[in-house]
Every structure is written in structure tokens, then in C-alpha cells.
Image (spheres, grey):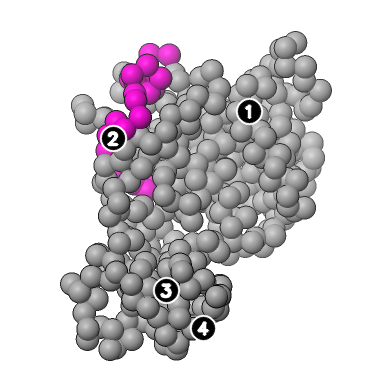
């Protein structure tokens, strides 16, 4: 049975099944409520039930007392709807709403999706979850105290595992370990989330998303979040690589475009080989976007890739296409400068 849940003061609403928690239902619809452990223990997801009835589930007494329940409070990570509901809680919509944590994680999956790209899935402890905005990154904490930053490639509603796209860098301390020594079930520690590269949801402008190489990771998170939120803003994705192998999840992007009329995907190769048999767009990825969008004055642009690509896109989108400077959002993948070249560190 399905019930309607209305959130105050945002006035957002979503449907919730009787056998899922209110938090699970909200995340499924792209709405992020505050939460921490998702196990009824920390109280971070506490809110008030203004109208309707809930089943409190496994809420633990120290996090939700009998007096709290009598006052109409509930833990939305474990409470489920038993009728239509009106609830009161603050939605997570800004950086200031999200706590930065240091957590352990187990390597759940290693999949080489290109000769030099590893898809890494990290599983958090059962009592922990990481809240983040689509497009943010985490710092992997190395034993020598150094950090390596990787964008989260999954959307916030899909947080059972954290997905990273790791490109192998010659001589890279951490990426060398990922490709040569890391095994499933290994334990890592990370700190996050970080960064200001995330979807601005208070705008209805069309979106231009430009990625170079593994810069596709945060773009993927943003697109999947927009789909979950049923956002219908026109969304154009341009993904550039040297050869076809660099577009390691092109099939996924093609599926987005096929399933959603407002999404367009344009792959671009700069150094296609004869083996690629490429008849698509060629050259610099941001230049291909400019050819299709000579006027960006009414758009937002989200660009992620190498520093040179990001700098060129910023310069040319603003100067030649009229993009407002404050509508350009970027994540520049710079290499660590501590003497051990490695995967991108995202300055935010």
C-alpha cells in the first residue's frame, strides 16, 4: 500500500510504501532528509509527524524516547508510514547542512572498465551512511598522512556503496596500489564529503555538462540525481576522451538519452584510432559543445576534467558564448603535488 507524505516547510511531497522507511522513500524520489547511521541509533534523522500515523520500527530508546514519541517525534530512517503523512523536517539542500565525517570503508568491488580506469565500490559499516550532494568528492586517507581525492560517481539516493572512478597514473602512489595490489574486502579510510561542485537546484536553466576522461564521475552523479528528482530541465552531456576506450560508460549515457527526451549525450574523441572506427564528433570536447551552443547566456555549465580543459571551457564559454560567469561550475582534476603523482585531487 502506498501513502502520500508531505514535507513542511518545503511543501515537497512523495509517495511511500508501507514496507519502506520514510527516509528510503524520500531518497528514492531524490529528496534528501538529514540522516546519519540509518539504523535508528544516532538521532540525526529526527523530525516531527504533524499529521498521520507511523510505525517507529527499530528506533532505539536512547535516540527516541517514549516522551519523544508522545510528542510526535520520529526517526525517519526507521519509521514507516501507516497513513498519509505531513512531516516537519529540514531538507539537505546546501553544503552547510552536511556533516564532514572520517569513516572506514571496505572495498566491495573492483572492476577495470578501461585499460587505465578502475571502478571502485566502497561499502560503509552497517551503522554508517555518508550524506553528500551529487558531484562532491571524498579524500582517501593514506597511511603516511597524505590524501587522494576522488569524486563520488553515485547519486545521494543510491548510497549503499560509494562509487569511485580511478584512473591509473604512472608512478602514482595510490593508483598504483589500486591497480596492482588492492583486493576486494580491503579496508580504507576516507574523509568527506568535500567540494562545491554540485547541482544548483534553485534554477530552471538548461544544463550543459562537460566531462573529460574520469571527470565523468561527478557528472554521472549529477545526472542520476536529476533523474531521481524527476528534473526535466534540458540536459546536454558532452564527454570527451582520446579514444573510444576512454568513454568507459558510454552505454550508460546512451541509455539515459534514450529513456529521457530532455537528455542528450554527445561523445567526442580527440585522438581516435583506426581500431575505433569512429564516425562521431572529434576534437576538443568543450569546442564541440560550443559548436552546438553558440549562445549560453541562458544556461548553466558544469565542467569536470583536466585543469587545461576546465580553464579553456571557462574562458571560451564566457567570452565567446555569453555564459554568465556565476553560472560556470567546475571541478578541476589536478595531480597531487607532494612529489608522488597520483589521481586527481579536487580543490573544490
Disc nearest the viewer among 3 and 1:
3
Cα–Cα gap, marks 4 and 1: 45 Å
Q: Which residue is mark 4?
A: 84
- Residue 242 higher or lower than 83, as above or below: above
Q: Which quarter of the figure is the C terminus placed in?
A: top left
- First in residue order: circle 2 vs circle 3: 3
Assign a secondary structure to mark 1.
Answer: loop
- Residue 197 higher or lower than 42, as above or below: above
Assign a secondary structure to mark 3.
Answer: strand
Assign a secondary structure to mark 2.
Answer: strand
Q: Residue at x 25, y 83 (%)?
A: 68
Cα–Cα gap, marks 1 and 2: 27 Å
- 289 vs 43, left or right, is right
Q: Which residue is mark 1?
A: 247
- First in residue order: circle 3 vs circle 1: 3
Assign a secondary structure to mark 4.
Answer: loop
Cα–Cα gap, marks 2 and 3: 33 Å
Nearer to the camera, 338 or 119 = 119
Asked if disc 3 and disc 1 are in contact, CB closer than 8 Å, the reply is no
Q: Position of residue 207 (x, y in %)?
A: 67, 51
Residue sticking out furthest to the top: 274
Q: Which residue is mark 2?
A: 188
Asked if disc 4 and disc 1 are in contact, CB closer than 8 Å, the reply is no
Q: Which residues are magenta?
A: 170-194
Cα–Cα gap, marks 2 and 4: 42 Å
Q: Residue at x 70, y 42 (%)?
A: 255
How many numbered marks does the figure carry?
Answer: 4
- 148 vs 329, left or right, is left
Q: Is residue 282 visible?
A: yes
- First in residue order: circle 2 vs circle 4: 4
Amino acid at each position: 500500500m502506498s501513502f502520500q507524505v508531505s514535507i513542511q516547510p518545503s511543501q515537497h511531497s512523495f509517495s511511500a510504501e508501507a514496507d519502506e522507511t520514510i527516509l528510503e522513500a524520500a531518497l528514492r524520489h531524490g529528496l534528501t532528509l538529514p540522516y546519519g547511521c540509518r539504523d535508528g541509533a544516532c538521532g540525526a534523522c529526527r523530525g516531527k509527524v504533524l499529521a498521520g500515523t507511523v510505525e517507529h520500527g527499530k528506533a532505539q530508546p536512547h535516540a527516541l524516547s517514549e516522551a519523544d514519541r508522545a510528542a510526535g517525534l520520529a526517526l525517519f530512517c526507521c519509521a514507516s508510514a501507516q497513513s498519509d503523512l505531513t512531516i516537519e523536517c529540514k531538507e539537505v539542500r546546501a553544503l552547510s547542512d552536511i556533516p564532514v565525517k572520517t569513516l572506514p570503508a571496505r572495498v566491495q568491488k573492483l572492476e577495470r572498465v578501461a585499460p587505465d580506469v578502475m571502478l571502485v565500490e566502497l561499502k560503509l559499516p552497517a551503522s554508517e551512511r555518508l550524506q553528500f550532494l551529487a558531484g562532491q568528492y571524498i579524500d582517501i586517507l593514506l597511511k603516511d598522512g597524505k590524501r587522494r581525492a576522488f569524486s563520488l560517481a553515485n547519486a545521494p539516493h543510491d548510497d549503499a556503496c560509494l562509487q569511485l572512478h580511478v584512473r591509473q597514473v604512472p608512478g602514482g602512489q595510490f593508483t598504483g596500489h589500486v591497480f596492482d595490489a588492492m583486493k576486494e574486502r580491503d579496508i580504507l579510510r576516507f574523509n568527506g564529503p568535500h567540494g562545491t561542485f554540485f547541482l544548483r537546484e534553485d534554477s530552471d536553466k538548461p544544463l550543459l555538462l562537460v566531462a573529460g576522461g574520469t571527470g565523468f564521475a561527478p557528472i554521472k552523479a549529477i545526472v542520476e540525481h536529476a533523474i531521481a528528482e524527476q528534473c526535466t530541465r534540458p540536459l546536454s552531456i558532452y564527454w570527451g576522451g582520446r579514444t573510444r576506450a576512454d568513454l568507459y560508460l558510454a552505454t550508460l549515457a546512451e541509455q539515459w538519452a534514450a529513456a529521457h527526451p530532455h537528455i542528450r549525450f554527445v561523445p567526442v574523441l580527440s585522438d581516435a584510432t583506426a581500431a575505433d572506427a569512429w564516425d562521431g564528433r572529434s576534437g576538443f570536447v568543450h569546442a564541440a559543445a560550443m559548436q552546438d551552443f553558440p549562445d549560453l547566456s541562458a544556461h548553466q555549465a558544469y565542467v569536470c576534467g583536466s585543469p587545461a580543459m576546465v580553464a579553456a571551457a571557462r574562458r571560451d564559454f564566457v567570452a565567446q558564448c555569453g555564459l554568465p560567469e556565476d553560472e560556470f561550475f567546475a571541478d578541476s582534476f589536478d595531480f597531487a603535488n607532494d612529489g608522488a603523482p597520483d589521481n586527481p585531487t579536487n580543490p573544490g
